[in-house]
Image (cartoon, rainbow, N blue to C red):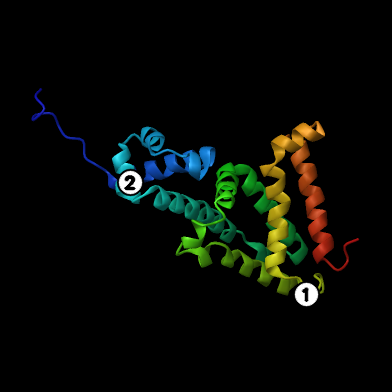
Amino acid sequence: MSDAERPRRRRDPEATRARIFAAATQEFTRHGYAGARGDRIAVRARCSERMVYYYFGSKDGLYREVLEGVYESLRLAEQSLDLDRLEPRAALIEFCRFVWRYYLEHPEFIGLVNSENLQQARHLRKSGKLDELVTPVVGMLEVLLARGRAAGVFRDGIDANELYIAIAALGYFYLSNTHTLSAVLGRDLRAPAQLEQHWRQSALVVERAVCIDAA
């Protein structure tokens, strides 16, 4: 069969773009912004390096979209939580557990946030979606705090932004530093029993900060 007679494979721009995005997420997670290379992304995405930048414009543009993507995935997952079905204290612990479990199951989030902190958030600050990425979940916590205060369960004066930072930190620091902490402490901090112990202790910290009757 001649080249002219051979059926041409139809291009699927959306599929190509999705492969590039997935490959770039892995590349930036593993190597950070500075170490990531377009040729490796192209090999993993099964396309040319020229196509990588055809779809995303530049390394900066691709990296920014990957960053936005991991934040958007977290936001969508957070919004799927149905906290109203639970009484305030149980809803608070459910939210904490969700955040910590999400970090465990999505190491690309921690890897990319670590990388962007090394870049002093210069790419994230350029995002046109910045207000959409974290504001909704802080609003969710504000509603929960108001519900808990009305029920006489939560203390007055708890700032939703500060609470979110505290909850995130309890999971993020532990998981982003498990290799060094495991070496220093002589235990596998990613073992299921160790994770469960940390989550129980962290939940107590949050409860004592927020709940009126916490010892």
- Does residue 125 lie above or below 151 as drawn? above
Residue, x 69% and y 60% (percent of image)? 165
Using the image, tell me which numbered label, if any, was put on residue 138.
Answer: none
Residue placed most toward the observer, 109 or 86 = 109
Side of 34 relative to 149 (left or right): left
The residue that disc 1 covers is 157
Residue 140: where, in percent of width, then height? Answer: 63, 67
Residue 101: where, in percent of width, then height? Answer: 66, 47
Q: Which residue occupies the extreme right position in the image?
A: 215
Residue placed most toward the observer, 31 or 161 = 31
Residue, x 24% and y 41% (percent of image)? 11
Residue 90: where, in percent of width, then height? Answer: 75, 60
The N terminus lies in quadrant: top left
Sequence-wise, which precedes: disc 2 or disc 1?
A: 2
- Does residue 80 lie above or below 24 as drawn? below
Report the number of discs: 2
Which one is closest to the eye, mark 2 or mark 1? 2
Kindly report the distance in space between the C-alpha atoms of the residues bearing marks 2 and 1: 49 Å
Identify residue type, mark 1: Gly
Badge 2 element: helix
Q: Is residue 93 visible?
A: yes
Q: Is residue 94 visible?
A: no
Identify residue type, mark 2: Tyr
Badge 1 element: loop
Circles 2 and 1, Cβ within 8 Å, touching? The answer is no
Side of 172 relative to 49 (left or right): right
- Does residue 129 lie above or below 187 as drawn? below
Q: Which residue occupies the extreme bottom position in the image?
A: 150
The C terminus lies in quadrant: bottom right
Side of 207 relative to 127 (left or right): right
The residue that disc 2 covers is 53
